[in-house]
Amino acid sequence: MATQTHYKERLTRARLREWIEGYLFATPFLIGFFAFVAFPMLFSIWLMFQRWDLLGDPVFVGFRNIERALTDELALKALYNSAFYTVFAVPVQLVISFTLALALTQPILFRSLYRAGFYLPIIIPIVATAIVWQKVFHPDFGIMNEVLGWLGVPPQKWLLDPNLAKPAFIFMSFWMIGRQMVIFIAGLGNIPAQLMEAAQIDGASKLRSLFSIIIPLMTPLIFYNMVIAIINSFQTFVPALIMTDGGPQNETLFVVLNIYRNGFQFFNMGYASALAWELFIIVVGFTIAQFYIARKWVYYEV
Amino acid sequence: MEPTTFPTLRPKSYRRQEIVRRIGLAVLQVVMTLVLITFLGPTLWMVSSSLKARTEIFAHPIVWIPETPQWGNYVQALTMMPFAQFALNTFIICALTVSGVLVSCSLVAYSFARLKWPGRDFFFGLLLATMMLPEIVTLIPMFIEFRWLGWTKPGTIFGFLPLNYLPLTVPYWLALSPLYVFLMRQFFKGIPVELEEAALIDGANRLQILLQIILPLSKPVLATVAVFSFLQAYNDFLQPLIYIGSRDYWTLALALRSMNDAQVGQWELLFAASTVVLIPVLIIFIVAQRYFVQGIATTGFGGR
């Protein structure tokens, strides 16, 4: 009896000690979470209802910022630009990265070299990428017009042409598929070899096994890459800031660029917060909607 | 039902199949090489243009390879601004970022992986949720918060560290990189618990266990996290743009941007500077490629 109590007591003591150690080790995150995640989020909800340029005192303006975020012509233009960019960039990115991943799982030579080359564009500092692509699209001395010229396409003004500026950014995004590709390669490597062999023995053509085996088995990764790509596309803006500063005629004014301008150039902290929340809700809404739609097409093994 | 014919029973057609397969692979090899050239095109053009004479940059048709490499472009590009200072600034920020991530994330990851405490799973859920949180929502309130702390003012702390670097690096010391915590936690969970139990019985405390048992066994994940966080800090543009005021404290990214805004016609200098900025990234990429692939394949995140 006595030994049992003693044992229990030691156990609780050890458990208590583990609790304390647990909190101590997690302290950086606990502080960080409250100071730089939870508090800023609550604070920005409060900010939405203020007019504040950081110099004077914040003034309560009710729903005016939110109303403006939902009706302002530029804000809506920015939303349209980001949506346009996302709708056209993401599907093509997925097709390119999936095709490259398929090709790199065939028995060709120097596979790791190709993989590294396709991955490279996304580790180049974003400023350098933006600068180089700005010159690539230069109407007179850029390589885009030069290469298209070989195919007989007349020179275009790209970033200076209101109709071609967004397509130029979409085109540029096709180079940024390295992460998606690596994920697809990893997934393709996990497809059971017996399945492919069985299909081959049954006389299925390569194309047939692609559509009946490989793609269905890859749908969870396609879905995953799609969700992340949409979230990222809605948030791109650094290339636009450097290459066009939102022009011409606000055709490349993307949502985050609009938020950045209002926050850090015009110092409309309240309005910028309202815009940020608007974007956040749209992105979360999109993501949730995709999870619902995913039930219809994503195949999960049981 | 027709009997299944096995390829081995029909050697002639099998050989033909093999030839078709080989031709297919050869075609694929050629196509992939063309695609690779397309992917590297802008970068290669940048490097080649950085060695061109001004007249070659603005020539029609495009000069792909400079006749005589103008190495002087590099000297000129690197001396028109205090480039060494910007490089040093950038590496200070990178060092503070990488060390902060390694220290704080390994402590937190160990707590989430091994220690039992009330609320642990709840907070781990919160950590994963912050992975999905767009940076933009907290950008403005965090700026105001850092302004209250006085970290957006000019001036230094400890006599050498610019106050403006604190908003860029302190969050990393507070484990606000859910991806890295997650990566480390997964790795720590894979280490046999018996090793720790033996050490606990021998009277070791948790910190000793983390430092002497767990971390030495976790070099691959530490390398992955170090590489990712270095690149994240090195390539970052938005945070330095918002927080760094004085030109003396600029990073390479900010310097490149200002050069781009100022130098309208001197592409060769701009490309030379961009190439120099790219070199550290390339070296790390070549040396640590397998850590990239591992990191992305296990988490689906990373890179950018």
Image (tube, rainbow, N blue to C red):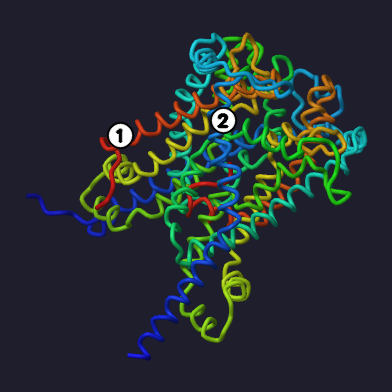
Residue found at x 61% / y 55%: A28
On the image, the x and y values in percent for residue A59 come to: 63, 18
SS of the residue under disc 2: helix
Residue B159 at least partly seen: yes
Q: Tell me the tag on residue A235.
A: none
On the image, the x and y values in percent for residue A243 come to: 69, 22
The answer for which chain carries disc 1 is A
The answer for which chain carries disc 2 is A
Instruction: Tell me the crowding category of disc 2: few under 14, some 14 to 19, or many 20 or more residues within 10 angstroms, Cα based.
Output: many
Q: Identify the mark nearer the N-term, 1 or 2.
A: 2
Residue found at x 81% / y 26%: B267
The amino acid beneath tag 1 is: Tyr
Residue found at x 79% / y 26%: B260
Residue farthest along the left direction in this orientation: B1
Judging by the rendered image, the residue that carries numbered circle 2 is A44
* Residue B15 higher or lower than A229, as above or below: below
Mark in the foreground, 1 or 2: 2
Residue found at x 84% / y 23%: B263
Judging by the rendered image, the residue that carries numbered circle 1 is A292
The amino acid beneath tag 2 is: Ser
